[in-house]
Amino acid sequence: MKKNILISLCAGALFAFNAEATYWERVDLTPGEKDESSIFIDMGSFRIDNNELTYWEKILKQDKGYELKRILLNCEKKVEKILDLLIYDYKDKITANHSYNREWITIATDSHADKIYYLLCKDGMPREPKDREFYIKNYRKTFLLVSPDETKPDEINK
């Protein structure tokens, strides 16, 4: 019982820092592609400190619930780490709550994290809000309709 109360308090504290209205923008596969999950970024969750950006990511698992991750992204070093992870079942009940203090993970080329990096960072710094919003909203055109070898996001609409 005490564990459930503690988990609920921790989850409440995590969301207190993100009290603004959430607006989730999808940043994963196009409809029709085979995958068991959908990935979204909370457009109101961005916090910037020098060259680091913190944001929330939601991963919907088909018929299995979802995960919320608070991610810290270092734009200068192209590394990231998960700060918090909340796992919900399909009934919106928290089944796990983790806070981490792990080492930085290098972002692998051509990974999902690499695509997110190019949406959120430019020249080793977090993108300006309007610039960031444009790239996130145009994600499918940026990464899924144009070959990564042909262009990067900064080259579109010059």
Image (cartoon, helix red, strand yellow):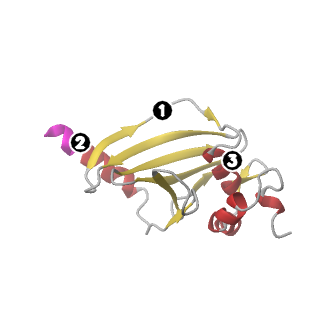
Closer to the N terminus: mark 1 or mark 2?
2
Q: Nearer the viewer, residue 108 or 124?
A: 108
Q: Position of residue 4 (x, y in %)?
A: 20, 43
Q: Are marks 1 and 2 in contact (CB under 8 Å)?
A: no
**Residue at which label 2 appears:** 6
Residue type at tag 1: Asn
Closer to the N terminus: mark 3 or mark 2?
2
Question: Quick one: label 1, few (<14), some, or many (20+) residues within 10 Å?
Answer: few
Q: Main secondary structure of the magenta part?
A: helix
**Splitting the image into 4 quarters, where does residue 109 fall?**
top right
Q: Position of residue 46 (x, y in %)?
A: 56, 58
In-image side of 31 versus 86 (left or right) = right
**Residue at which label 3 appears:** 51
Which quadrant holds the N terminus? Answer: top left
Residue type at tag 2: Leu
Q: Nearer the viewer, residue 60 or 48?
A: 60
- The residue furthest left is 1
**How many numbered marks, from 0 up?**
3
Q: CA distance from mark 3 to mark 2?
A: 33 Å
The dot on residue 101 is: 1
Q: Residue at left 28%, top 56%?
A: 92
**In the image, which residues are magenta?**
1-5
Residue type at tag 3: Asn
The dot on residue 26 is: none
In-image side of 4 versus 92 (left or right) = left
Q: For numbered disc 2, what is the local secondary structure?
A: helix
Closer to the N terminus: mark 1 or mark 3?
3
Q: Position of residue 123 (x, y in %)?
A: 79, 50
Q: For numbered disc 3, what is the local secondary structure?
A: loop
Q: Residue at left 25%, top 48%?
A: 8
